[in-house]
Structure formats: C-alpha cells, structure tokens
C-alpha cells in the first residue's frame, strides 16, 4: 500500500513557518507514516538550518522506511529573505509555494496540503489580490469554509478575514441557510462526530429581543428554523459571550461564529498551541497551524511546533477518513 502524500508549505520564509515545519519533521517518529513533500528551494533550507543551528540532514534520508521526505523546488528561488518582517519577496515566495502545492492537490498528486503561516501584509506587498489561504481557496471552491479544531473546542466561521463593518450586510436569511447546509454537508463527509451546532448571535446578548439589534429576529432565527426543519442539528442564536463556554469540552459540539474574532478569541485562549485550521468543503485536504508568523520571535529558535505537528496529524486523520469513505 502506498504512503499518503502530504505536501508541506513553509509559509512566510521570514516568519516561524520554516522553523516549526523543520522541528516537526525532525521529530518524525511522532508523526504519521506518510510521504512528506516540502515545497521550497535549497537556499531557504540552508538559511534556516544555519539560522537555527539545526541539522537538516536527517530529513534527507529518514531511517524509518514507513516515512519519506522529499523536496519539490519552487522556482524561481527567492534571492533575499526578510527575517522577522513582512516583505514583497516573502509574500511572493509563500504564495507561489502555496499555489504550486494546491495545483498538485487538485491534480490528485497530493492527498493533503499542510500550510505554514503566511503574512497577509506580505501578500499585499507582493500585489496578491487574496487576503489569505482561505480566500484563495474560496475563489476556486466557493463552498470552502474556515474551521478550527481542538479537543476542547471546535469553531466554524461564517465569514473569514473581513473588516467588521462588512459583516452585518452578509447576515441574511439566504446566506445563513446556504452556509448551514454547506457546513453540515462538509462535516457529514468526514467521520467527525459533530452532533450539534451552536450558532452565535451577531449582537450583544444575541440582540436582547431586538433591543440591541434586529439581525437575530429578522435573519438568524428564521434561518435556523428553516435549517432545523430540514433536519440540521442547529441551536441558537446564543449570546456571543457564552456560546463558546457552552461548547467547551463537548466533543460532539461545534460553534458557528459569524465573524473571525467572535470565534477565534475563545478558541485561541483554550487551544493556542494545539489548535488546527481545517478548510472544509474541498475535494482534497488542507490544514494549517492556528497561529500566525510570529515575526517577533522568528529565527530565535523559540517557536513551538506543536500546532504544526497537530496540523499534520489532522491531515493524516482526514486522509484516512476519506479513504474509508471511498471503500
């Protein structure tokens, strides 16, 4: 039986993405049996091995025959790495590595893609029109959903990286119903035992019967009722300040947050080191650590690789799920 093929993108080359990836792979015995394909170029490997005083040689010839590491070149190589800060060159490289890996996944050459953290500002400096990984995937697969998974808490985001003032106009009955259906269908295609979705309100106290906002009464509640009649296990809307508490340590429960920070403040508070970003609704698997580039500690050897290790493990788990479902 062939090994699952998992593509690894290092993220912004001036952030902690390369460090957490190499640290994770140097502890290869803790990772699932797979072929790991790193999208990079030799000069970047040399730079980071020297910067961190890491011996990368074991990655080139792992002793465990149930695991394999290869490198896929990203051309042209980046000539300058801006360590600890965003730059157009950093953004250009991280985008090219990411899109190359995604294209291979779309062609069936990879079973999963695990991406290191990128800098959205670096992408902007490089004149890349998408804000981040999920937005790029959304233009290829409009049904793609950003979700975050950990043992204590699970969260799905109705909207992704948007200025806050752009969120309320999206809170319509039609948009919500489509999202609820898409999320439930995507979850159902996995073996994850999500049996209940708790929907957060938009306004404080979930609107307080219209005193603090009418989106709940006019849009959210009718959308939830339609979804419930269709058999979806939704409840809410709940006051945003308690909804994550109600889902905490409930293995079969997921919070639906209406905007980025509504869900991720709570998620990162309880699961920062082990949390994983999973893009649902794709024909292939994509996971990522839940943290950013951490430019302030880049190159200092201080980065914790736990979230990257967990992202790889979740990718493998999802591969196993999809293979079992195909049987």
Image (tube, grey):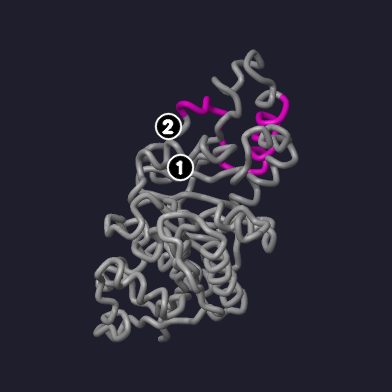
| 226 on left or right of 22 | right
Residue at image x 63%, y 44%? Answer: 180
Residue at image x 37%, y 49%? Answer: 296
Question: Split into 4 quadrants, where in the image is the N terminus?
Answer: bottom left
Q: Nearer the viewer, residue 95 or 321?
A: 95
Q: Earlier in the sequence, mark 2 or mark 1?
A: 2
Which residue is labeled 1 in the image?
253
Which residue is labeled 2 in the image?
246
Which secondary structure, mark 1? strand
Whether residue 177 is situated above or below residue 317 in the rendered picture: above
> Does 236 lie within the magenta span?
yes
Point out the stretch of residues depicted in magenta: 218-242
x and y percent of residue 287 in the render? 47, 61
Give the quadrant of residue 108.
bottom right
Q: Nearer the viewer, residue 128 or 137?
A: 128
x and y percent of residue 309 in the render? 34, 62
x and y percent of residue 200 in the render? 55, 32
């Amino acid at each position: 039986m062939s090994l699952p093929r998992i593509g690894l993108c290092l993220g912004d080359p001036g952030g902690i993405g390369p460090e957490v990836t190499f640290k994770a792979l140097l502890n290869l015995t803790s990772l699932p049996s797979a072929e790991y394909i790193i999208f990079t170029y030799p000069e970047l490997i040399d730079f980071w091995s020297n910067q961190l005083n890491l011996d990368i040689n074991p990655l080139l010839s792992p002793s465990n025959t149930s695991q394999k590491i290869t490198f896929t070149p990203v051309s042209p190589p980046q000539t300058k790495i801006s360590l600890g800060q965003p730059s157009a060159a950093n953004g250009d490289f991280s985008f090219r590595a990411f899109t190359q890996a995604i294209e291979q996944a779309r062609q069936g050459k990879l079973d999963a893609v695990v991406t290191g953290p990128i800098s959205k500002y670096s992408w902007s400096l490089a004149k890349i029109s998408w804000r981040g990984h999920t937005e790029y995937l959304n233009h290829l697969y409009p049904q793609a959903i950003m979700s975050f998974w950990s043992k204590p808490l699970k969260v799905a985001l109705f909207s992704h990286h948007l200025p806050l003032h752009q969120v309320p106009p999206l809170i319509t009955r039609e948009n919500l119903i489509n999202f609820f259906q898409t999320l439930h269908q995507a979850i159902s295609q996995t073996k994850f035992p999500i049996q209940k979705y708790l929907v957060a309100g938009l306004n404080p106290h979930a609107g307080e019967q219209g005193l603090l906002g009418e989106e709940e009464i006019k849009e959210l509640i009718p959308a939830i009722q339609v979804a419930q009649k269709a058999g979806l296990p939704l409840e809410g809307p709940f006051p945003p300040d308690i909804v994550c508490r109600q889902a905490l340590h409930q293995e079969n429960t997921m919070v639906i947050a209406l905007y980025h920070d509504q869900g991720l403040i709570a998620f990162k508070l309880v699961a920062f080191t082990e949390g994983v970003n999973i893009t649902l609704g794709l024909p292939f698997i994509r996971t990522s650590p839940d943290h950013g580039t951490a430019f302030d500690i880049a190159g200092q050897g201080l980065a914790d690789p736990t979230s990257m290790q967990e992202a790889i493990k979740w990718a493998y788990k999802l591969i196993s799920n999809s293979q079992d479902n195909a049987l």
